[in-house]
Image (spheres, rainbow, N blue to C red):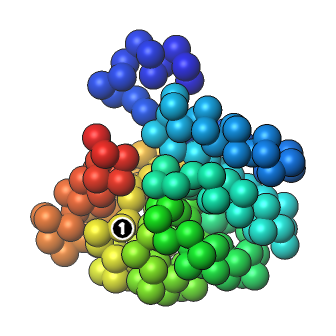
Amino acid sequence: MDDAVAAHPDRFVGFGSVDLLRPGAEVAAAVEEAGRKWRGIGELTPPPGRADLLEPVLRAAGDLPVVVHGAAPTTAADLAAVGALARKYPRTPLVISQLGDEHWIAAIELVREMPNLWLELSTASLVFSVRPAIAEVPDRTLFGSDAPYGDPMPARALVERVTPSETARAAVLGGNAARLLDL
């Protein structure tokens, strides 16, 4: 990733990794280092029932975006804990990836309630989950395809199909990410 970002800074941005199982001071140091080098932290995947491990990252992140894995092994309780942490750290943009997977309704509700939460759409292949996400929070929904595991073309076509306005479509397909990452 270092080479790709260095070679093409106009095309790629990177997110730094943080080991959630390290002591708090080491996590803070890793977040600080990542913040100097990258545009955000993530995608972080705490073990099931351990969303609390995200707190040292959020404490250190400040206004640096943090992406949290939204699909399994993330549980409904983990998603609720992510919401509680978002309330506790309102300065930190927190992105729930994969539209919260099977917990997509709860994810949309959380993002609607908290201005520092965002949704990312990778692996969200169901029209009836993507449509309300974009309708409810068009200004904080991010296109994603989960490439190379997912295919960007059908993911984009889905967003284009369910987005009612060109303005919202442009926001979801890149404008929101540019704003979040200060590009």
Query: Looking at the rendering, in which quadrant would you find the C terminus?
Result: top left
- Name the residue at the left extreme: 166
Q: Is residue 109 left or right of residue 52?
A: left
Q: Position of residue 152 (x, y in %)?
A: 42, 46
Residue drawn at 13 percent across, 64 percent down: 166
The residue identified by callout 1 is 140
- Rendering coords of residue 169 (x, y %): 22, 62
Residue at 63% across, 65% down: 70
Q: Is residue 2 left or right of residue 164?
A: right
Foreground of the two, 168 or 24: 24
Quarter location, residue 118: bottom left
* Quadrant assignment, res 104: bottom right
Q: Quadrant of residue 12?
A: top left
Viewer-side residue, 183 vs 36: 36
Q: Residue at x 64, y 73 (%)?
A: 85
Q: Position of residue 164 (x, y in %)?
A: 19, 75
Residue at 44% x, 16% y: name it: 6
- Can residue 125 be seen from the camera position used here? no
Residue situated in front as seen by the camera: 38 or 119: 38
